[in-house]
Structures are given as C-alpha cells and as structure tokens.
Image (cartoon, helix red, strand yellow):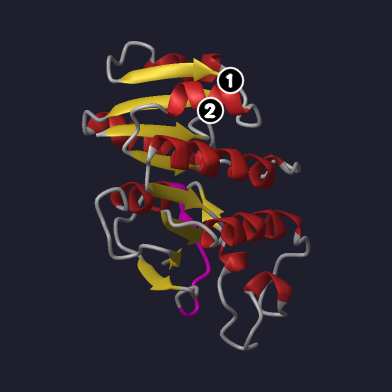
Amino acid sequence: MNLFILGATGRVGRFILLNALKDKNNVTALVRDPEKLDNFLNDAHLTIVRGNVLNPEDIRGAIKNADVVISALNTDGTTTLSESMPQIIEEMQREGIKRIITIGTAGILNSREYVDLLRYASPESRRRSTRAAKEHHKVYDLLKQTNLNWTIVCPTALSEAEAEGEYRTTVDFLPENGRKISIKDTADFAYMQILNHTHIKARVGIAY
C-alpha cells in the first residue's frame, strides 16, 4: 500500500514507520528534520519529504497517491496538531483519500464515572495539565465533521517497555483499570488499523 505518515520521527510514529517498511509498504514521510530518519535512508520503500505540516503546499506535494494517512503528530506544547488537521483533511478530500488513523490520548475517551464528560474534563483523569488533551479533542471534533473513515487510537500512559503483544482495547472508553501501554504495542495496534475496518469513525482506548 501507499502510506503517508506524519510524525514519523516521534515516539509512536517511528515504530509505525518500522512496521510499514517491514511489510514493504511504500511510505512517504513528511518531516521537518529528515536527518532524524538517517537510519532509514537506504530503504527503497521510503520517500522522505522535508516540510512543515502547517504548510498546505508541503502536504499537497507529499500526500499524492496515498491510500492511507497516518498521523502520529504530538502536541509538543504547541497548537500544531489542531492547526494542521484542517489542512490534512482538505488535502485528503482533494485527493479522494478516505482512510486516516491518528494517535490521540486516553483523555478524549468517555468517562466511565461522569456521564457526558470526557476523561480529561473529569476527576477520572490523573493528569494535572489538560492542554494536550484539549488539542486532541479539537482533532476529534474536526474528524467527526467529515465523511472520512477515521480511527483515533487513544493510549493511556505510554511506557518505553518492550511490546507484550497482548493488550485490551475498548471503543469510546479506556479498558477498565487500564494504567499503561507500551509505545511499541500502541504503534502495532495503530498500524493494524490500516486493513482493519472494525473501528471506523471511532475512538479506541488501549491499555494492558
């Protein structure tokens, strides 16, 4: 398949990229700093494009011919995530691309204890800052308004541990008593959504 990956140099994005190349997919990665992908330079299936996700022309030039878009962009203390999504959506619609998988956060899942609240807006969340969750919430709201086949993978606290290969997922909620999930297992699950149509137009909580 032809994949367009955003955030390929990030914690989760890097492992999604590894999985995609391992399966011989053709991948285009739009990154600000191509040097961070030096280890992949010899892979014939990877095209690295230097650019900024906030620049519509950069997206337009890199997204062509993609079958699936994967966004593993993080918030980095900025509004890049929410500002870039309208441009991504516009270019997907321009090119007729329907499938997008994004990495979100467990904060934008429904609260189990407080009806009508998302986790980050309820006492259920243990995070002191809600800034990142608010960014992901904006992305969720934007995607809901489209006709795209979107899936938002919503991990709880990410760990650097090795992949366990077994984890729990729940649509719209964090799995009960979920406390953590590894970066690698999150990336594996997100990557598998490329051909999985079970979670179309859904947020999926993931945890051990």
Q: Which mark is residue 59?
A: 2
* Quadrant of the rendered image containing residue 134: bottom right
Query: For the view shown, which residue lies furthest in the left direction?
Result: 23
Q: Looking at the magenta stretch, what is its main secondary structure?
A: loop
Measured as percent of width and height from the top left, residue 121 is found at 72, 74
* Quadrant of the rendered image containing residue 21: top left
Q: Distance between the Cα atoms at labels 2 and 1?
A: 8 Å
Decide: is 91 above or below 128.
above
Front residue of 60 and 70: 60
The residue stretch that appears in magenta? 176-183
Decide: is 105 above or below 19.
below
Magenta region includes residue 82: no
* Quadrant of the rendered image containing residue 165: bottom left
Q: Is residue 171 left or right of residue 58?
A: left
Residue 162 appearing in the image: no
Q: Which mark is residue 51?
A: 1
In which quadrant of the rendered image does the N terminus lie? top left
Count neighbours of disc 1 (C-alpha within 10 A) and say few if under 14, some if 14 to 19, many if 20 or more: some
Measured as percent of width and height from the top left, residue 11 is found at 52, 39
Magenta region includes residue 180: yes
Tags 2 and 1 in contact by the CB under 8 Å rule?
Answer: yes
